[in-house]
Image (cartoon, rainbow, N blue to C red):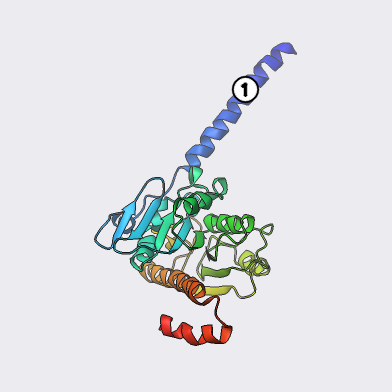
Amino acid sequence: MMRVRKFILPGFLILILLGIAGFTIWANTTNEPMAEAQSAMLSDSRVIVEQDPWLVFRPAESTPAIGFIYYPGGRVDPRAYAPMARAIAQEGYLAVIVPMPLNLAIFGAGRAQEVIEAYPEIDIWALGGHSLGGAMAARFVYNNPGLIQGLALMASYPASSDNLSQYQIEVISIFGTRDGVMAEEALEDSGGNLPADTHWIAIEGGNHAQFGWYGDQTGDQPATISRVEQQRMIVDAILNLLESLGDTRAYGNLPSWLSRFLTPVITG
């Protein structure tokens, strides 16, 4: 019996190590960012790009007061979201894509805190994420009430344990009607965990993979619109959210009737 135990324990440890090694290889196997994503990583006269410790995109000729933090989807190279972040920075906002341990946001849901502390000049923060990244962005909001003013869920929804329905936060939920990865029923059921005034944005013909620039994704449905068109709608939705947060900052202390009167002046 002692001899059997002598061999069982080392064998069990070897199996554990093999499992860890296999999981690590699986998590770090991501699709190569497309050419459009790699070119978006270059600084120019409009946008300055930094790559350590996060992927930071900031306008070259202005100092932003509103920032947008982004959590990548599971096993997606963070550079795949560079075109989106660059487009946001071109409009005068700070955009920060946060790489995750093992490319899985579940292991780094609290990393937005580090970004916020690194940029004290930012008055208002929005947080977003794609797929698993969106779920973990919602978890950060749930665990840090009042710290984030806007939440952008992309092909994503909060876990049932992260109920945001009573939180004072502006939320947009963007999804593609051809998404073959995210369960449509789960998205519909998530409405009870989000504020009643959540803005739901359906991208007709959009799918799961076109939320980034990393090619196709196993299990997804073919999109019936181009990646460029889907990305345009995603960026427009985020910019609308950020602009709305800026309006709230500018007129939040005014009487509601005066705020409603002035808002069209600054947004039109």
Q: Secondary structure at mark 1?
A: helix
Going 67% across and 20% down the picture, which residue do you hit? 8
* Type of amino acid at the residue the image marks with label 1: Gly
Q: Residue visible at 32% across and 54% down?
A: 49
Q: Is residue 48 above or below residue 17?
A: below
Residue 138 visible? The answer is: yes
Q: Is residue 226 above or below residue 119?
A: below
Along the line of sight, which residue is nearer the eye, 244 or 185? 244
Residue 74 percent location from the top left of the image: 51, 51
Of the 4 image quadrants, the one containing the C terminus is: bottom left
The quarter of the rendered structure image containing the N terminus is: top right
Residue 187 pos. (x, y %):
61, 66
Can residue 215 be seen from the camera position used here? no
Rendered residue at 47%/85% (across/down):
262
Q: What residue is pinned by disc 1?
A: 11
The crowd level at tag 1 (other Cα within 10 Å; few <14, some 14-19, many 20+) is few
Vertical relation: 140 (above or below) 172:
above
Number of numbered labels in the structure image: 1
Q: Position of residue 160 (x, y in %)?
A: 68, 59
Q: Residue at x 38, y 54 (%)?
A: 56
Q: Nearer the viewer, residue 215 or 137?
A: 137
Give the camera-side residue of 29 and 110.
110
Outermost residue on the right side: it is 1
